[in-house]
């Protein structure tokens, strides 16, 4: 028996216990090596006219023998000589595929999956013994390489008749490994990891006591086919089969990149959110392939959080099959692909928005919250990427519109007005909204808790500032009206001071901006009433209070009533102050601290 080198022993042990934590990928690795071997022979047949082999004759054959507990993977590829067995299998991390790929840098008509030469040894995660019987093409001698683990290996002559390689795994005796001797399990692993290997993977299946070879894999993946040859039905069927969705997707993005960076991608925009999408258990990511071989089920680095709803696959020959999650995070190729995919997704959403509005509205209903979160997260770093995807309910249009449409519809307006609340219908009834609507202003009605936070981060859109109509900064009065109001407040400062002392507010003042309502609450500073609600609803958060201002309609009869009470009965004025403030809080959806006191005060007022 020959021993592995000391460093090879350590590498094997480290690889089995650390690098490959998912045991089932052993079959992916061995099948990929078999595909490489066939690729090499196919390439030689293209360059050497003496080799007369039909590509259709190439295949990978899998056999299970439950009695002997063996799983055999055979290929009719280029095979290995005794020296190559020694070199490629005797030294861990020595890759014949890597050397061959370097020799053929032009990559003419050939793809080599494996690069690092460690994948083969993943077989020892499930096998107590691994035997490799190989005969190189156009040679007479065949040899057998055998090993039971890190102790070492033996090489001896064998009697294999045909060129190619047989890898025979003796599956470990423990019960957990029995599944690797079941037809259905091996089929599932082939479909999961190696479905798009370009050569047929055939498996011996017994039907009615007769053994037949059944092709398991799909051979050519949909994303590698020419777009013009694929029907909409095929795209939708692939989506439902691959991602187990009962509803067809809203759109798909099929991309093929060539040149310095090569990759194929097929991305889908779902019609609805999955049941766990807005939970912490949801995992984003695209399936990542290298030459049709699955590297990672969900590669999160391929898509940003705000596009985490997309499903799809990415396949690139520029990525190594044997690559860890940590290596992927540092991979420049992956970052470039991710940037391209992000741009394609946004472009497709904009196209849907302008050309397929009904589909976009359906998308917005399902994933609009995620786009708004993308605006707010990362301190607004991504706002310019996402702002044109946003939609809000327009008071004037009576439907959802984009910010771009708001600006186009209100070209003479210097600001973008918005109001927040619990629902569109509730927001429409706010006194401040009614007043601006009367002045023919278009207001974005925002019932979602993230809306205002997004506006605060964005600050502007196309040089137009976002203005909360419930802020005390809203001023649409004429100069004459301003002067008249200023005089009223100055003349009533003692009355207003008395009212303020009874209430938990920053200020009490008369206003001319209300139409029919007697009072409203406005806020001063960066924290609005709606933001106060949201932040105070969060767990483990200190209580936040907006700087509230009680505004009294100077044109409403209540204004004169307050003036009369101040002169005749200041104590009664205090009761009115509390009732009016409670009324303003109720309009804004805020709780009343002492509802019993307020109801008693209302009764006292009513009976007089």
Image (spheres, grey):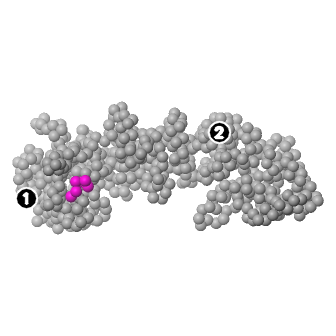
Q: Which residues are magenta?
A: 181-186
User: Does the residue at mark 1 contact the one at mark 2 (Cβ under 8 Å)?
Assistant: no
Residue under the image location 64 percent in, 49 percent down: 423
Residue under label 2, please give it.
398
Relative image position of residue 487 (x, y in whole percent): 89, 49
First in residue order: circle 1 vs circle 2: 1
Query: Which disc, if any, is residue 480?
Result: none
Q: Is residue 227 left or right of residue 426?
A: left
Residue under label 1, please give it.
156
Looking at this view, is 381 or 456 the one in front? 456
The reply to whether the magenta stretch includes residue 184 is yes
How packed is label 2: few (under 14 Cα within 10 Å), some, or many (20 or more)? few
Quadrant for the N terminus, please: bottom left
Q: Is residue 524 left or right of residue 94?
A: right
How packed is label 1: few (under 14 Cα within 10 Å), some, or many (20 or more)? few
Give the foreground label among 1 and 2. 2
Q: In the picture, residue 18 is in which quadrant?
A: bottom left
């Amino acid at each position: 028996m020959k021993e592995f080198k000391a460093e090879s022993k350590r590498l094997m042990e480290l690889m089995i216990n650390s690098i490959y934590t998912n045991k089932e990928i052993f079959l992916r690795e061995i099948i990929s090596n078999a595909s490489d071997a066939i690729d090499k022979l196919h390439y030689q047949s293209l360059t050497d006219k003496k080799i007369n082999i039909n590509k259709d004759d190439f295949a990978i054959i899998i056999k299970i023998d439950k009695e002997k507990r063996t799983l055999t993977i055979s290929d009719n590829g280029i095979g290995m000589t005794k020296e190559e067995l020694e070199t490629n299998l005797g030294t861990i991390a020595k890759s014949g595929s890597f050397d061959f790929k370097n020799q053929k840098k032009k990559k003419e008509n050939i793809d080599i999956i494996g690069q690092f030469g460690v994948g083969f040894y993943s077989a020892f995660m499930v096998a107590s013994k691994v035997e490799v019987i190989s005969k190189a093409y156009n040679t007479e001698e065949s040899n057998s390489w055998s090993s039971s683990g890190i102790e070492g290996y033996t090489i001896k002559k064998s009697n294999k008749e045909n060129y190619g390689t047989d890898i025979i795994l003796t599956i470990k005796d423990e019960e957990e490994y029995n599944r690797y001797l079941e037809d259905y399990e091996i089929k599932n692993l082939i479909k999961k990891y190696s479905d798009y290997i370009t050569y047929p993977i055939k498996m011996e299946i017994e039907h009615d006591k007769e053994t037949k070879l059944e092709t398991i894999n799909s051979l050519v993946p949909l994303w590698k086919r020419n777009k013009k040859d694929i029907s909409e039905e095929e795209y939708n069927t692939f989506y439902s089969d691959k991602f187990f969705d009962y509803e067809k997707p809203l759109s798909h993005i099929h991309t093929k990149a060539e040149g310095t960076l090569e990759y194929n991608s097929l991305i889908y925009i779902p019609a609805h959110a999955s049941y766990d999408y807005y939970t912490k258990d949801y995992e984003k990511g695209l399936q990542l392939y290298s030459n049709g071989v699955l590297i990672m089920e969900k590669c999160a680095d391929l898509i940003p959080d705000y596009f985490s709803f997309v499903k799809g696959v990415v396949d690139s020959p520029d990525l190594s099959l044997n690559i860890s999650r940590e290596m992927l995070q540092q991979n420049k190729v992956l970052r470039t692909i991710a940037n391209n995919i992000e741009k394609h997704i946004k472009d497709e959403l904009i196209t849907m928005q302008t050309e397929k509005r009904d589909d976009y509205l359906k998308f917005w209903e399902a994933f609009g919250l995620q786009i708004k979160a993308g605006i707010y997260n990362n301190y607004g770093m991504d706002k310019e990427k996402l702002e044109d995807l946003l939609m809000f309910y327009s008071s004037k249009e009576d439907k959802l519109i984009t910010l771009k449409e708001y600006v186009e519809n209100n070209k003479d307006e210097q600001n973008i007005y918005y109001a927040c609340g619990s629902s569109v219908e509730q927001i429409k009834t706010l006194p401040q909204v009614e007043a601006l609507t009367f002045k023919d202003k278009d207001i974005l009605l925002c019932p979602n808790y993230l809306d205002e936070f997004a506006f605060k981060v964005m600050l502007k859109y196309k040089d137009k500032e976002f203005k909360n109509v419930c802020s005390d900064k809203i001023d649409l009065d004429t100069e004459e009206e301003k002067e008249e109001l200023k005089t009223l407040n100055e003349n009533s400062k003692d009355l207003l001071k008395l009212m303020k002392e009874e209430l938990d507010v920053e200020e009490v003042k008369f206003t001319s901006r209300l139409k029919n309502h007697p009072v409203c609450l406005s806020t001063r500073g960066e924290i609005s009433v709606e933001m106060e609600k949201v932040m105070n609803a969060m767990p483990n958060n200190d209580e936040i209070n907006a700087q509230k201002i009680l505004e009294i309609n100077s044109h409403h009869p209540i204004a004169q009533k307050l003036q009369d009470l101040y002169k005749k009965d200041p104590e009664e004025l205090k009761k009115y102050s509390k009732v009016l403030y409670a009324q303003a809080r109720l309009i804004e959806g805020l709780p009343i601290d002492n509802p019993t006191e307020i109801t008693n005060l209302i009764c006292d007022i009513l009976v007089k």
